[in-house]
Image: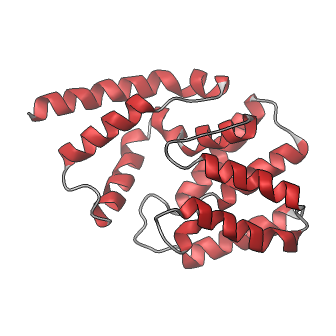
Amino acid sequence: MQFEKVKKHIMAKLKKELPKNLTYHSLGHIKDVYTAAETLAKMEDITGEEHTLLLTAVLFHDSGFLRQQKDHEAISCEFVREILPKFDYTPDQIDRICGMIMATKIPQTPHNRLEEIICDADLDYLGRDDFFKIGNYLYDELSMYGLINNENEWNKLQERFLEGHHYFTTSAINLRKGKKDEYLAQIKEKIKNYN
């Protein structure tokens, strides 16, 4: 696997071709999830080939946005199948990477440890200090797509999402669950005060 070459290739492609109006699913999000995946991989003792597969999946997990928002995970897998053979990834490695990418589709459905780690890394911000800042990027993006119309709708969406979400790895639970629960309580308060 020529990981460094793949990383350079896909990051350049995303930087150049991702729609500029994506405020959440941006290059910044990919870098953020990459950092979170590295942290969780270290905590979960993921090394060697598995580590490389995980980080490759992170780099490609939202590449489908290059084409469209709907079903972007499946499109990300098309890019993986098209690009990775050129960088010496085997069919089995590609299948495992696509499994990780598809696991991030909401609602998340991981079937193994690597899939759990990418899911937790993808939503790492839910339990971090920059939760509201990153949430605002998502609010702007969903507003642009016409999926939400005002702040109260957004808060209700976040309430449902946070109530339905759970981290999968022990590391993410220990790192992020407490703060995530605090944010859920704050959002419930906002909704109560809105009415």
Q: Residue 116 placed where, x, y %?
A: 66, 36
The N terminus, quarter of image:
bottom right
Residue 167 position within the rendered picture, expressed as x and y whole percent measured from the top left: 56, 30
> What is the number of callouts on the image?
0
Residue that appears at 12% across and 30% down: 193
Q: Residue at x 42, y 48 (%)?
A: 134
Q: Residue at x 81, y 68 (%)?
A: 84
Q: Is residue 71 left or right of residue 131?
A: right
The relative height of residue 41 versus residue 179 in the rendered view (above or below) is below
**Outermost residue, left side:** 195
Query: For the view shown, which residue lies furthest in the bottom direction?
Result: 16
The answer to whether residue 29 is visible is: yes
The answer to whether 102 appears left or right of 41 in the picture is left
Quadrant for residue 80, please give it: bottom right
Compared to residue 151, the image places residue 72 above or below, namely below
Residue at x 32% of width, y 65% of height: 145
Residue 168 located left or right of residue 38? left
> Which quadrant holds the C terminus?
top left
User: x, y percentage for residue 141?
Assistant: 36, 61
Residue 27 visible in this rendered orientation of the protein: no
Query: Which coloring applies here?
Result: secondary structure
Q: Is residue 104 above or below residue 1?
A: above
Q: Whole-percent x and y of residue 57?
A: 71, 54
Establish if 156 lies above or below 28: above
